[in-house]
Image (spheres, rainbow, N blue to C red):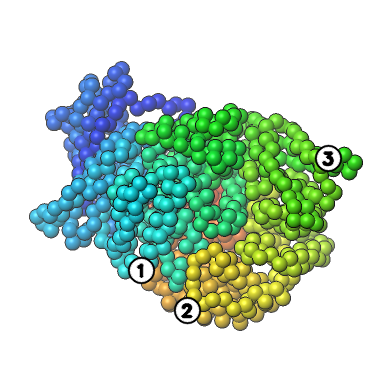
């Protein structure tokens, strides 16, 4: 498949034009063969804009076998680099196009591909053009019928969207199945899967009493690992009915799990395709985090049925219309299913560690981008996670009831349509009466706003005056910034009594004041409770007052945030003066630990978070330029202080008996997390590995096995780590998903001979360069998480990653473009690292046939 382009050009939101034709129906026949698949497409086309006389159909890497209009061979068309330009003098016509291509050679895993004896599709964003000539844009909606013909023995299951309408056998050992999807959809939601699977079936009765068949298809032998996914699906269906009154609409809902997949999952109508990593789970092979991910991704894809499928995007610039909203919905779901605070902290970490970084780097873009070279590059933390934060702010401004009214109006107005983010905001505003005019700027402005806070308390008047000022620094894509409408949620709490009050202040101007009357001296205020806006806050806080917040604020997020701020300050203190500030930092850490462990915090999940340091990427974002190694070492130093200060507490937690039976339940998850965190600190502080070894040997679940292994991955206990890693590999050699965890543990290890280890990993029998999960575990983990070795002073880490990106460029450009992310910020680095990273990027830029995916990111980074 050809992904290369001579000189890629950007497409712009401002260039949007309606298609001008209606595709009234699509009728597809697939004759599946791994090396040569033939697709016959029959389209009923009707002209909408009578002034148009050309019909444009997108197509890429296709062999055109025949082209007919109204049953006659038709030759008035031109083949271009991106498809067909058909002279179309008709008002309406039947178009029949036969194409063929080679799915087996399609390593990009986009379009229709053949891997691990299975045919599978991925069409979003623009993959359908690799299957047939078609208007590959989300605003062309049609009714689809599909017939699949294939070898019966090799591919007993032939699946597509909608309801099954027929099946039969054919000569030569073949069979066929036909499908019809009554709901109009764009081609990015088309799906086809053909293969042999284990099938798990269940059913769900909707609130209006309709019975829906649920079918989960997994690789042979994996049926035992499918029940958590099915349960999650039923919970999601119920939650969407209860929360938004949204019911499922077809008679069947299918999910297929495949091992070769570029991302997490895909919401194709009635036929979700999932990366098997986010479907299969049992206690022996999956961690608590895996269980969480399965539940939330199953929910996410299910929720797309309304937010994405029933109402879809007019153009790809509107991607956040469906993704921001659906992420917000899955976040609300997860928070209802487990702990609100653990979820919120996880979401904020993603924002601070990844989204703020993206917004400060060369790929900065608003949640509704205005210019795109390769659409696949815009499935970003900005569009998804910042997009969800923007929806959350609307939820805060409207309240739960107003938000629900807005959703109802959105579906009433737009069911069955392809719409814009503006349409969504208009529905929210019209239904609630809340003015969202200025708020809309969040959709077109990139960058992370900074809010400066200063407080003044007047003892005599008992007034607390909070001065707030906002500014959004210029970003790579946008120099001028405007003032945003920022909801500042606040809480006034009492340091001596269990009293508090709260509110939301609308910051709309550059500077404003929040004034609170009748404030007592022992009261204090926290702002941006529950992270009410995706902004950075600038204010000066002492360690003492941060400890007060950690102990007394009601808002758990603010308690965690106070801890994060203190830890960051201490890490920077060491970074900036490594020799003379250690003793001071150590005693500050001792004081915090003493207070926190003495405070009897009953929520172990929260306690765990209060005792965890901010991530390296969050810290990196706090400075313009960086001595990576110095910062890394400063963070390690503080981790050691924390570990030592926690010695007694950790020993207590480790020795607590916990129930041996595994349950995936909020409280149990928190207990395991705290235990595993304390085990880490214990090994770090004592250099003793007995407890970790014991846990590894006795573990009955993957969370504890991995917890023990990662605890042993310290400099002092590396030999023990290695020994147990060997045992782990022997036990799980046949199980690629578990092996991915093993690959990642190795690839993330800080050891000087890491590149030799990397070579051993990539020559492992089960490693496969064509499989994104394997590549991400090995190369991805190294590039994203092995800070000291990726940034090794001699530049060997950068070179290693660049070598792999260059190799991936011709195999799977989407995966290559993900892994290049840590290399894009070369400008931030100090000294020789900066030049070394830049040189590797230049090497990537010089790759012959560089994909659009890499071109867009690398050229932006180099131009910055
Ligand atoms: N919509 C898909 C992502 C498609 C990515 C295309 N490169 C999964 C999701 O967000 O639900
Ligand atoms: Zn999504």
The answer to which image quadrant residue 374 occupies is: top left
The disc, 3 or 1, on the residue closer to the chain's N-terminal end is 1
Mark 3 falls on what kind of element?
strand
The disc, 2 or 1, on the residue closer to the chain's N-terminal end is 1
Question: What is the distance, in whole Å, between disc 2 and disc 1 at their CAs?
Answer: 24 Å
Above or below — where is 563 with respect to 362? Answer: below
Mark 1 falls on what kind of element?
helix
Q: Nearer the viewer, mark 2 or mark 1?
A: 1
Above or below — where is 563 with respect to 62? Answer: below
Q: Nearer the viewer, mark 3 or mark 1?
A: 3
Residue that numbered label 3 is attached to: 463
Residue that numbered label 1 is attached to: 224
Residue that numbered label 2 is attached to: 727
Above or below — where is 531 with respect to 742? Answer: above
Res 676 visible:
yes
Tell whether circle 1 marks a residue whose Cβ is less than 8 angstroms from ligand 1. no
Q: Nearer the viewer, residue 775 or 187?
A: 187
Mark 3 neighbour class, 10 Å CA radius: few under 14, some 14 to 19, many 20 or more: some
Res 271 visible:
no
Instruction: Give residue 701's position: percent from left, percent from top.
Output: 48, 73
Quick check: 838 left or right of 90? right
The answer to which image quadrant residue 549 occupies is: bottom right
For the point 12% across and 55% down, the residue is 169
Question: What is the distance, in whole Å, between disc 2 and disc 3 at their CAs?
Answer: 65 Å
The answer to which image quadrant residue 214 occupies is: bottom left
């Amino acid at each position: 498949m050809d992904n290369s382009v001579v000189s890629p050009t950007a497409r712009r939101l401002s260039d949007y034009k309606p298609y001008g034709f209606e595709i009234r129906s699509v009728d597809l026949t697939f004759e599946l063969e791994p090396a040569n698949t033939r697709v016959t497409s029959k389209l009923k086309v009707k002209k909408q804009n009578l002034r148009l006389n050309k019909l444009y159909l997108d197509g890429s890497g296709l062999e055109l076998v025949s082209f007919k209009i109204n049953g006659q061979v038709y030759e008035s068309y031109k083949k271009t680099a991106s498809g067909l330009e058909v002279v179309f003098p008709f008002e309406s016509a039947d178009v029949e196009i036969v194409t063929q291509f080679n799915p087996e050679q399609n390593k990009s895993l986009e379009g229709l591909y053949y891997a691990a004896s299975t045919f599978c599709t991925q069409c979003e964003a623009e993959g359908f053009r690799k299957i047939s000539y078609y208007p590959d844009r989300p605003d062309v909606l049609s009714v689809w019928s599909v017939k699949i013909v294939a070898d019966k023995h090799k591919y007993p299951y032939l699946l597509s969207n909608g309801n099954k309408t027929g099946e039969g056998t054919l000569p030569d050992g073949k069979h066929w199945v036909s499908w019809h999807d009554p709901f109009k959809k764009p081609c990015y939601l088309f799906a086809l899967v053909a293969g042999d699977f284990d099938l798990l079936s269940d059913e769900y009765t909707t609130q209006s009493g309709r019975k829906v068949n649920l079918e989960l298809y997994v690789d042979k032998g994996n049926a035992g690992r499918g029940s958590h996914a099915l349960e999650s699906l039923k919970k999601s269906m119920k939650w969407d009915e209860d929360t938004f009154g949204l019911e499922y609409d077809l008679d069947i809902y299918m999910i297929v799990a495949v091992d070769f997949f570029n991302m997490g999952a895909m919401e194709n109508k009635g036929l979700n395709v999932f990366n098997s990593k986010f479907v299969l789970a049992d206690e022996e092979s999956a961690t608590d985090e895996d269980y969480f991910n399965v539940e939330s991704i199953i929910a996410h894809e299910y929720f797309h049925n309304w937010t994405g499928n029933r109402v879809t995007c007019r153009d790809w610039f509107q991607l956040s219309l469906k993704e921001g909203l659906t992420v917000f919905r899955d976040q609300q779901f997860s928070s209802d299913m487990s702990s609100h605070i653990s979820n919120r902290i996880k979401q904020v970490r993603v924002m601070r560690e990844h989204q703020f970084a993206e917004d400060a780097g060369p790929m900065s873009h608003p949640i509704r981008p205005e210019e795109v070279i390769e659409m696949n590059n815009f499935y970003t933390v900005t569009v998804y996670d910042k997009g969800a934060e923007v929806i959350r702010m609307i939820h805060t401004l409207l309240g739960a009831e107003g938000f629900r009214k807005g959703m109802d109006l959105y579906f009433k107005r737009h069911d069955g349509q392809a719409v814009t983010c503006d349409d969504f905001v208009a529905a929210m505003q019209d239904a609630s009466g809340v003015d969202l005019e200025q708020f809309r700027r969040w959709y077109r402005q990139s960058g992370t706003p900074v809010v400066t806070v200063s407080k003044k308390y007047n003892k005599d008047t008992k007034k607390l005056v909070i001065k707030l000022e906002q500014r959004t620094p210029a970003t790579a894509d946008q120099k001028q910034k405007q003032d945003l409408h920022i909801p500042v949620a606040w809480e006034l709490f009492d340091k001596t009594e269990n009293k508090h009050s709260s509110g939301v202040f609308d910051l709309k101007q550059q500077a404003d004041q929040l004034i609170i009357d009748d404030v007592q001296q022992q009261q204090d205020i926290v702002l941006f409770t529950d992270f009410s806006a995706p902004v950075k806050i600038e204010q000066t806080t002492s360690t003492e007052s941060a400890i007060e917040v950690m102990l007394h604020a009601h808002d758990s997020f603010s308690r965690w945030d106070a801890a994060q701020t203190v830890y960051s300050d201490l890490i920077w203190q060491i970074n900036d003066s490594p020799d003379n500030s250690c003793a001071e930092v150590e005693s500050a850490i001792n004081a915090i630990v003493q207070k926190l462990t003495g405070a009897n915090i009953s929520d172990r999940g929260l306690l765990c978070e209060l005792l965890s340091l901010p991530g390296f990427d969050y810290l990196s974002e706090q400075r313009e330029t960086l001595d990576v190694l110095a910062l890394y070492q400063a963070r390690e130093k503080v981790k050691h202080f924390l570990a030592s200060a926690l010695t007694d507490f950790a020993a207590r937690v480790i020795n607590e008996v916990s129930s041996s039976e595994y349950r995936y339940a909020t409280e149990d998850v928190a207990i395991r997390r705290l235990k595993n965190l304390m085990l880490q600190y214990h090994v770090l502080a004592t250099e003793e590995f007995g407890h970790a070894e014991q846990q590894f040997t006795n573990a009955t679940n993957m969370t504890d096995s991995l917890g023990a292994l990662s605890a042993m991955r310290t400099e002092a206990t590396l030999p023990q780590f290695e020994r147990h890693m060997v045992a782990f590999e022997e036990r799980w050699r046949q199980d690629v998903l578990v092996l991915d965890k093993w690959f990642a543990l190795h690839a993330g290890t800080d050891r000087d001979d890491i590149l030799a280890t990397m070579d051993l990993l990539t020559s492992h029998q089960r490693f496969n360069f064509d499989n994104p999960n394997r590549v991400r575990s090995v190369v991805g983990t190294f590039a994203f998480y092995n800070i000291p070795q990726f940034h090794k002073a001699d530049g060997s880490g950068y070179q290693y990653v660049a070598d792999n990106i260059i190799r991936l460029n011709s195999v799977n450009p989407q995966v290559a473009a993900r892994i290049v992310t840590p290399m894009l910020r070369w400008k931030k680095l100090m000294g020789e690292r900066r030049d070394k990273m830049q040189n590797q990027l230049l090497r990537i830029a010089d790759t012959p046939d560089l994909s659009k995916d890499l071109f867009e990111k690398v050229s932006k980074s180099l131009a910055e």
